[in-house]
Every structure is written in structure tokens, then in C-alpha cells.
Amino acid sequence: MKIFSLSVVLAPSSGPCSVLSSTSDVSSFSFYQRGSVSEFLTFFTKTVVERTPQGQRQSVQENNYTAHVYNRSGAEQLAAIIITDHEYPVRPAFSLLTKLLDDFTAKVPQSAFANPGSISFPEIQTYIQKYQDPRQADTIMRVQQELDETKIVLHKTIESVLQRGEKLDNLVERSNALSTQSKMFYKTAKKQNSCCVIM
Amino acid sequence: MTDTSVSTQTCFRSLASLLLKSPSTIEVLPGDASIWIPDVAERSCSPFLFIENNLGVPEKELRRSYLYAVPIFSAARKASGLHTLENSSNHTLSSAIQDLIDSSAVLILMNPAYQTALNARKQLIARNLITVEQELKFTAALLSSRHCCKQSELWYHRRWLLRRIYPTPSFPQWLAEDVIPDSPNFYLPPNDLTVEIHLVTRACELYPRNYFGWNHRTICIQSALVPGVHFNTSDVFTEIFAKEIASVMQWIESHVSDYSAVHHLKTLARLIEDTESAFLPDNLLPVFGHALTLVRAFPEHETLWQYLRVFWDEGDVATAFVASFVLPLQSTRMTEQENDSPSGVQHACHFLEWRNQRLK
């Protein structure tokens, strides 16, 4: 039961999204994997957020990871995404995202969004540490009753959120954000159809 | 010799020497060296990576070294006379022994269940050609690798080494069996127990639900409890049991589908019941409460229901739990379609059937 990464993303209705604040924990991976895992977490974050319609919540599984996304849109056009293992329960994940977004909008002015480098939001570190135990989210879940009525779509593979004609293999191959090593990890994991490594 | 075979030979020797440097972790990396070492300046250990004492072995280089090591290993085994009693001349012997040490290390990295190579190393130790301490470091490094840490042979090899350092003291057999059944065949001092537990923890993180890792941990705990070695047995027992139970309970909280961890905890509980120590079975009561809390929090995980079963203690708490949680959960099945029912309902039904059987 683990949270690998947590991000707040600016997701305009069209065009690419940009990560405003983000944190990750790759300590459970082996030494030479860590760099590639970090790259893939960022890649996965952007790929999934860009394909989540405004106002929607969805969960996407890919290999060993589950990404839970909440594209809250609204005036700020913000989305939040958490990438966990398959064991991490769904409801705490979404409660956490709502709380994270509330906290973020309260602390960071919208004028800062244009320049993500200037944003300081150290609280995100506390989130990833505290909520490694999902039971910590029980208290915030009680406040957020609305979640019960919301139907959350679960996609068993990332392919089902991709647009027509898009393929994950091609996205990985074309990505400039992924190093040769990361692409190699991806290919090997795919070939072995393994439950291991990166993505 | 052609150029390729010369370079394969260098590659093989350099891998063997890196393996014996006792790196803190070893990883097999996909692809060949060109992907991993594009920068000429970093080629000090080429075609391997050695950063901050972490060894990275590109898969293709490992395969090449392996193929090169196979004939060397079988020739060296013959020449060193390890499998026969005859002795060769000293010069051939020492080079054969170096070959044997190097080739077996590479073979084991490629295939950690390679019995012949593991046996050759045991024989080298028996003849004092490798020290047990060196070999312990070598196996610790191997066990940091995902494809190695799930191999029972490798864990067994490690216990064989521990037994050479810490054979059980000789005391009457009836005593040993009386105090601890299935008495282990080596004794483990507290510091070494910590080392083993640390190794197992890392291995179980790398390879989830790692049965052989947990099995090693169970045996090591038993070995730390060998009677007759401690001055004040009961204190040591209490300390080891209390610490171990607390740490496994914590592990289960964050690894809710690790059934091997639950099995280990149950084995500990049996050990406590069978051992006449100051650590009474009453100390296990919090475990039942722990299982109840976890099932309430994550009812969709079958492992936790099994955890609850093995520590189930019929009584007021148990009855209240069934009435307030299990029955309401089971009843949600009646109202909804079976494949649409909330997760955990199936487990609740199975649990109730099990309990009814028990109450009969």
C-alpha cells in the first residue's frame, strides 16, 4: 500500500497541461531504477491528466500503478493526480485529492500559475508522507460526503483513455521527457508482460 | 584468441571481481552497455556500472559473461579436483581455483538456483579457499537483486554459511526438543539476527509476498532462540518476540496482501505457545484486535480475512464484531447483483461459513 507520487496540475480545456507542484517517493525501487521510475511518474501524470475531461474523476491502471485523477476545472482550471500501487484504496485517494486542491488554491494565488518554478507549496510533502497510511484519510472522508454519489470510472489499462489512433508505445517512443534507459525499461517490462519494474 | 573472445574474457573477469567487491546492491539492467554508459568518461568499470557501491549489470553483458563462464566452470571443477579426491599440481590448482571462484559467481548471478555452482562454493569454503564472511557478503549482495531474492536455494546457501559460523552448542537432544520443537541447527546472536531481518525486509519489498524470504526470517528467529546459549533466556526471548511481533504487525498494515507475512506471524504465535518462556501467549491478544481493525478498514483484501481467522478468538469482542460489521456487510449481497456487490462481501460470506463450521 503505497503512494508513489502526488501532483497539482494546471489543465486548460485545450492544449498541454503543466505541473504546478509535485512530489514523489521512489525509495522502494532499486538504485538504477529510481531515475526511470521518476520520469515515468511524470510522463504518466501528464498523459492521464490531459485525457481526463473537465469536472471528471477517473482511475487508470497501468502495469503496477494506479493513477487517480480529479480534474476539478472551475475558474482555476486545476487538476490533481495521485499515483499509487493497486492496493491503495480508491475513496481515500479521491478525498485526498479534493483536500489537496482546496489547500493549494488557498495558499497559492492564481497569478503564480504562469510561472510554476516560483510556486512554493511544501505542504505537498506532508501529504505524501502522512497519507501513506490511507486510514489517515478517514477524517477528511467524513467531511466529503459528495464522493458517495459520484461514480468513478475505472480503466483497467491506459489504452482506454487514449484518443483514437493513439498508442502508448508510440507516446513512449516519441516522448522527449523519457531517457533511453527509461524507454528500455518500458520495452523490457512490456516484452516480459511482467508485473515488475516501470510501467 | 580473437578480439571478441579477449574482450569477453576481460568482461567476465571484471564482472567477477566487481561481484566479489561486495556491492551493497546488484541490479540486472535491460539492454546492453551502450544504453547505460553513453559517456566515455564514466567507463571505468565498463561494460558495468558501479556507482555509490551499487553494481549495475546490463543484461546482454551478463549473458555474454555467463556463456563464457560455463566451460570455464566445468574445466575448473575438474582441474581443482573438488569433486574427486585426487590432487593436481599446485600451480594448476591455484589458477583453477581462481577460475572456479570467478565462474561460479557469474553463474549464480545469472541463475541463483544453480546447485552445482552453489555446491562448488560450499566446497571452496570447506577447504578454506573462500572465507565464510566473504561469502555472506556475496549472498547479501545477490539477495538485493529482484530475480535472486525469491530463490529458496540462495536463502538456504546463506543458512548453510550461518551454520558454519554458529553451530548449535552440544547439549542433550531431549532438552532441545523439549524447549523448542523443530530446533534449528544453528544459533544466531542478536546482532546477526538484525542483519538477517534487514535483508529479508529489503527482499520482501523488492519481491512482494516473498515466501522464501519470510521463511528465512522464521528460521532465523528460531535460531536466535536456541536454549542453553543465553545467560538469562527468558529476557532475551521476551525481547526478541516482542520486537518481532510489533514489526511484523506494522509490516502487515502497509502490505495488506502479504499472506507470507501473516503466515510468519502465525508461526511465531505457535512458537510462543510451545516455548516455556516469560513471554506469555497473552501478549498475543493485541494481534487479534489488530486483525479486526484491518479487516474493518480494508475488507476487500482476502489476506486480512485470513489474518483474522488465524488469530480468531471467540468471545464478546468477536461476537460484537460479527454483529456490527460482518453481518451488515454480508447482507448487502442479498440486495444487489452478485458481481455488482461491494468488494469484501464475498470474503465476509466465506468467513461466516467458516465460523459456523467452527461453532458446531
Image (cartoon, coloured by chain):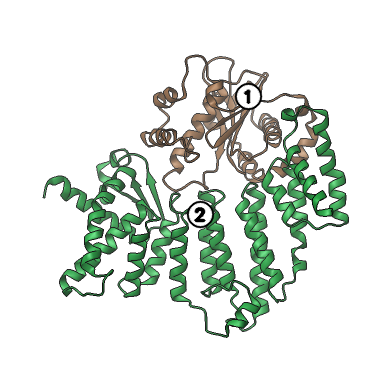
Determine crowd level at label 1: few under 14, some 14-19, many 20+ residues with C-alpha closer than 10 A: many
When the figure is inspected, residue B186 is found, relative to residue A5, above or below; the finding is: below
Tell me whether circle 2 and circle 1 mark residues in contact (CB < 8 Å).
Answer: no
Q: Nearer the viewer, residue B358 or A170?
A: B358
Q: Nearer the viewer, residue B292 or B337?
A: B337
- Asked whether residue A54 is in view, the answer is yes
Q: Is residue B289 left or right of residue B240?
A: right
- Distance between the alpha carbons at the discs numbered 2 and 1: 39 Å
Disc count in the image? 2
Outermost residue to the front: B360
Badge 1 is on which residue?
A: A78
Q: Nearer the viewer, residue A93 or A99?
A: A93
Rendering quarter of residue A100:
top right
State the SS at label 2.
Answer: helix
| Point 55% across, 36% down: residue | A65
| Point 69% across, 69% down: residue | B272
Badge 2 is on which residue?
A: B203
State the SS at label 1.
Answer: strand
Chain of the residue displaying label 2: B
Which amino acid, by three-letter code, is at mark 1?
Leu
Which amino acid, by three-letter code, is at mark 2?
Ala
Image coordinates of residue A60 in percent, x first then y, are 59, 28
Rendering quarter of residue A151:
top right
State the hue of chain B: green
Provide the letter of the chain coloured brown.
A
Determine crowd level at label 2: few under 14, some 14-19, many 20+ residues with C-alpha closer than 10 A: many
When the figure is inspected, residue B154 is found, relative to residue A111, above or below; the finding is: below
Q: Is residue B15 left or right of residue B2?
A: right
Image coordinates of residue B138 in percent, x first then y, are 38, 62
Q: Is residue B64 left or right of residue B262?
A: left
